[in-house]
Image: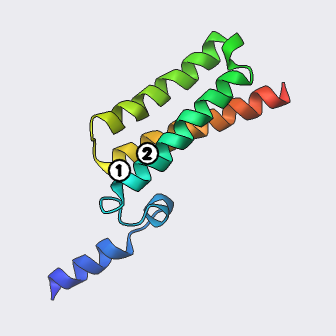
Amino acid sequence: MAHAHSENENLSGSGLLNKIFYDQNTNRYGIISILLLFVGCGGGIAVGLGALDSVIQLILLVVPTMIALSMILAVAPMKAIIYTSVIAFTIDILVIVYNAIM
């Protein structure tokens, strides 16, 4: 009986990322494809919109993007891939917004 209770807790999972990326290991290749698209294109757009002129912005974009891509290439656990990709894409968005305002 206790075993069934712990399964229900695992299935109900808390957190926004767990709800967005439901059943991460079954949908691994689809999720990785989407994250590659967002991280790669987001980084390219951010660099094209002004980060190329600033070394600090370029470093802020390159480091998390390379970490996310390295996690994908190393076939890391899906949780690590998702978190690093979300961090990289968030930084991309912040740099894009900063360059649009300035």
Above/below status of 18 relative to 1: above
Q: Are marks 1 and 2 in contact (CB under 8 Å)?
A: yes
Please name the residue that numbered disc 2 is placed on.
Answer: 83
For numbered disc 2, what is the local secondary structure? helix
Residue 71: % across, % down: 34, 36
Q: Looking at the rendered structure, which numbered label has been put on residue 68? A: none
> On the rendered structure, is 85 left or right of 93?
left
Whether residue 5 can be seen here: yes
Q: CA distance from mark 1 to mark 2?
A: 6 Å
Residue at 77% of width from left, 26% of height from top? 99
Relative depth, front residue between 24 and 9: 24
Residue at 16% of width from left, 81% of height from top? 3
How many neighbours does mark 2 have within 10 angstroms: few (below 14), some (14-19), or many (20 or more)?
few
Please name the residue that numbered disc 1 is placed on.
Answer: 79
Residue 32: % across, % down: 41, 47
Q: Amino acid at mark 1?
A: Lys
Above/below status of 78 relative to 17: above
How many neighbours does mark 1 have within 10 angstroms: few (below 14), some (14-19), or many (20 or more)?
some
Q: Quadrant of residue 84?
A: top left
For numbered disc 1, what is the local secondary structure? helix
Which quadrant of the figure contains the C terminus? top right
